[in-house]
Amino acid sequence: MLGYSVSKQEASKLLQIQAGQKALSPDNGAVKVTEELIDLGRDAFYQETFGNEILFTDVVGILDGPINLRSIVKAVLSLKGRELLTCKFL
């Protein structure tokens, strides 16, 4: 449920009463966590790029080493006056 977890046992008990059914409805923010949902989240976490790979690799140069003051200054200068808002993650 939105804001806290409900165990399978607790959900079974809640689903036996009308108030519990209402509380566990999707309209109240309840989401049934299934293996498919976990797999979907895992795939998104490991495979999605979120559109920020250009900023981090090409502008900041994250693959060239740790982000530090020098790499941030270099990234800002490489923008040549273009706004950061053109980056998808902002």
Image (cartoon, grey):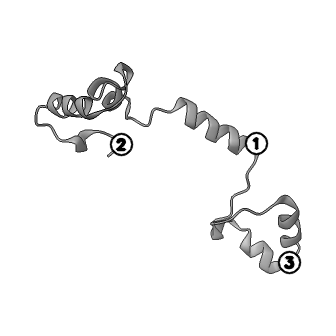
Q: CA distance from mark 2 to mark 1?
A: 29 Å
Q: Locate residue 42, reporting x and y percent.
A: 63, 37
Element type where label 3 sits in the image? loop
Q: Nearer the viewer, residue 30 or 82?
A: 82
The residue lying at 56 percent from left, 37 percent from top is 45
Considering only vertical position in the picture, is 4 above or below 32?
below
> Tag 1: Cα neighbours inside 10 Å, few (<14), some, or many (≥20)?
few
Q: Report which residue position mark 1 lands on.
A: 35
Verify CB contact (< 8 Å) between mark 2 and mark 3. no
| Amino acid under disc 1 | Glu
Q: Quadrant of residue 36?
A: top right
From the viewer's perspective, tell me whether residue 27 is left or right of residue 58.
Answer: right
Q: Nearer the viewer, residue 60 or 89?
A: 60
Marks 3 and 1, the one that precedes in the sequence: 3
The residue lying at 69 percent from left, 45 percent from top is 37
From the viewer's perspective, tell me whether residue 44 is left or right of residue 77.
Answer: right
From the viewer's perspective, tell me whether residue 64 is left or right of residue 86.
Answer: right
| Amino acid under disc 2 | Phe
| Amino acid under disc 3 | Ile
Q: Residue furthest bottom?
A: 19
Q: Residue furthest front?
A: 69
From the viewer's perspective, tell me whether residue 15 is left or right of residue 85.
Answer: right
The residue lying at 34 percent from left, 30 percent from top is 56
Element type where label 1 sits in the image? helix
Count of all numbered marks drawn on residues in the image: 3
Q: Locate residue 74, reporting x and y percent.
A: 20, 28
Considering only vertical position in the picture, is 48 above or below 29?
above
Marks 2 and 3, the one that precedes in the sequence: 3
Marks 2 and 1, the one that precedes in the sequence: 1
Which disc is residue 89 wearing? 2
Q: Quadrant of residue 39?
A: top right
Q: Report which residue position mark 3 lands on.
A: 17
